[in-house]
Amino acid sequence: MDIRIGDPFIIRITVRNNLDTEQTFLVIGFIYDKRGWIVEGMTVSEQFAPFESREIVLGPMTMPDAQEGITYNLFGGAYIGQDLVAHSDNPDFVRVVMMGDVNADNKVNIFDLASVGLAYGKKYGEPGYDRKADMNNDGVVSIFDLATVGLNYGREIK
């Protein structure tokens, strides 16, 4: 999964209480780097009725201090005591792409400008809207998104 610095993301965990008694689950989600340092995380405690199953959504979270071009590991789990009883439904990693890099190829170039151009003026939910071209996540591909690509034009991560 590719995200940009400041993009909101969520961690989804499907949890099921397999017992005929009420249970409390500690649900944890976090992103960590290759050194094992946690960059962002969230924890909640949830009550489940007997045999209840539901999806727990942690977030939205952001990674304002993340580094572009770096892949971070993602973990989500539900615990009863020290026992892991469910894990995240998300991919196991996220890659932070640089601002302006619409197609996530580690270069800001004409292809990124073209992607914003194709979606220009489109709003969330309309045909042709491209979330990746909506650099500021405001629900519309506008001059601000085009300017973001323009300001970063020529940047490359090797």
Image: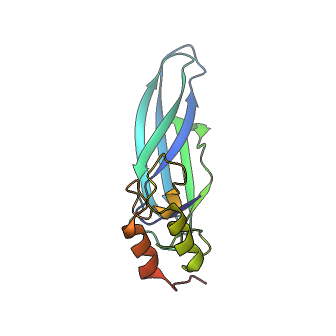
Work out whether 79 lies above or below 104.
above
In the image, taking residue 148 as reference, residue 116 lies left or right, namely right
Please state which of residues 127 and 133 is positioned toward the viewer in this rendering.
127
Residue 115 drawn at (x, y percent): 56, 67
Decide: is 97 above or below 62: below
Residue at 46% of width from left, 36% of height from top? 26
Which residue occupies the foreground of this view, 6 or 51?
6
Q: Residue at x 53, y 57 (%)?
A: 130
Applied colour scheme: rainbow
Please state if 46 lies on the left or on the right of 51 as rendered: left
- Residue 107 visible in this rendered orientation of the protein: no
Going by the image, does 24 lie left or right of 20? left
- Between residue 96 and residue 75, name the one nearer to us: 96
* Residue 15, horizontal then vertical, whole percent: 56, 31
Q: Is residue 59 above or below residue 46?
A: below
Taking the image as shown, residue 63 lies to the left or right of residue 87, namely left
